[in-house]
Amino acid sequence: MPPEVLGRGKQGFAVPLARWFRGPLSALLRDTLCAPAGRRGYFAPGAVDRMVDDHVLGKADHAHHLWALLILELWHREFRVASIAAPPSAPRGIPTPAAGV
């Protein structure tokens, strides 16, 4: 290997999110962000739907924004975090206070 390659620092690498969201992950994206379960009240549903549609149809590249929304929704599901659209509930494993306390 050339010395300039061996001596350089670490570099990141690109993940083909845009292509994946238009192809093999498009169903996951729609099922997660456009379904009622993915509507937590943080964002206007119509805006999210348009962003997904525009991206999947190749009209725009919203891959990084869609990745952030997808990960946020999956995080909510994993940790059962209440959203502003749903009444609050205690996270898993944390006891709720007794009535009248």
Image (spheres, rainbow, N blue to C red):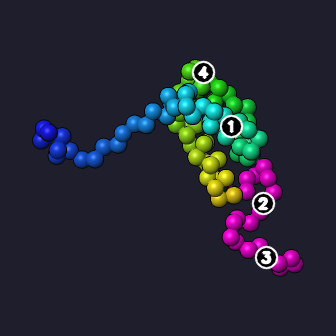
Q: Position of residue 29 (x, y in %)?
A: 62, 36
**Image position of 25 (left or right of 81):** left
On the image, numbered disc 1 is attached to which residue? 31
Real-space Cα separation, disc 2 to disc 3, in angstroms: 13 Å
Mark positioned earlier in the residue sequence (4 or 1): 1
Q: Helix, strand, or loop for circle 2?
A: loop
Real-space Cα separation, disc 3 to disc 4, in angstroms: 49 Å
How many residues crowd mark 1 within 10 Å: few (<14), some (14–19), many (20+)? few
Q: Helix, strand, or loop for circle 3?
A: loop
Check contact, mark 3 vs mark 4: CB within 8 A: no
Check contact, mark 1 vs mark 3: CB within 8 A: no
Real-space Cα separation, disc 4 to disc 2, in angstroms: 36 Å
On the image, numbered disc 2 is attached to which residue? 88
How many residues crowd mark 3 within 10 Å: few (<14), some (14–19), many (20+)? few
Given this view, does label 4 or label 1 mark the residue nearer the observer?
Answer: 1
Label drawn at residue 57: 4
Residue occupying image coordinates x 70% and y 65%: 91
Task: Answer with the quarter of the image where residue 31 lies.
Answer: top right
**What's under tag 2, amino acid-wise?**
Pro
Check contact, mark 4 vs mark 1: CB within 8 A: no
Check contact, mark 2 vs mark 3: CB within 8 A: no
Mark positioned earlier in the residue sequence (2 or 1): 1
Label drawn at residue 97: 3
Mark positioned earlier in the residue sequence (4 or 2): 4
**What's under tag 4, amino acid-wise?**
Leu
Span highlighted in magenta in the image: 81-101
Given this view, does label 2 or label 1 mark the residue nearer the observer?
Answer: 1
Magenta span: predominant SS is loop
Quarter of the image containing the C terminus? Answer: bottom right
